[in-house]
Amino acid sequence: MDAAVFAGGHTHQQWARRLGDAYYVNPGSVGLPVDHHQSESPPRADVFAEYAILTVDDLGVGVEFRRISFDVGDVIRSVEASGMPNPENAAGPWRQRGTPT
């Protein structure tokens, strides 16, 4: 491996792991972050947009995870107005959610 950092996704969770001499980073999910340790099934969507800031310099590699809360009502209204098929299903993960924790 020649890379210092690998980035992936699709787990909807923020995390970093060592992979040999490199790091494997998942920045999270801007659109549908979930806490997979919830007892609910399916898990509720968290009301955060998640991302990561990666720095690589002479001192090494740094990853800073960030979260920004958003208005759940705005998301639901946006999904319903989008014209997408089955908007009630797409908005479902946020309908179960109240305020950010």
Image: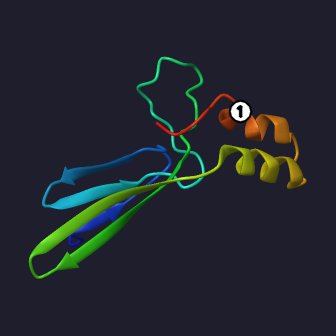
Residue at the spot 13% in from the left edge and 61% down from the top edge: 21
Asked whether residue 20 appears in the rendered view, the answer is yes
- Residue that label 1 marks: 95
Expressed as whole percent of the image width and height from the top left, the position of residue 27 reads 40, 57
Asked whether residue 84 appears in the rendered view, the answer is no
Expressed as whole percent of the image width and height from the top left, the position of residue 100 reads 52, 40
Q: Is residue 97 left or right of residue 24?
A: right
Which residue extends farthest left?
59
Is residue 30 placed above or below 2 in the rendered structure?
above
Viewer-closest of 56 and 3: 56
Which residue extends farthest bottom?
58
Is residue 89 placed above or below 66 in the rendered structure?
above
**Could you say which quadrant of the image residue 2 lies in?**
bottom left
- Near mark 1 (Cα within 10 A), the count class, few <14, some 14-19 or many ≥20, is some
Residue at the spot 76% in from the left edge and 45% down from the top edge: 76
Residue at the spot 66% in from the left edge and 28% down from the top edge: 96
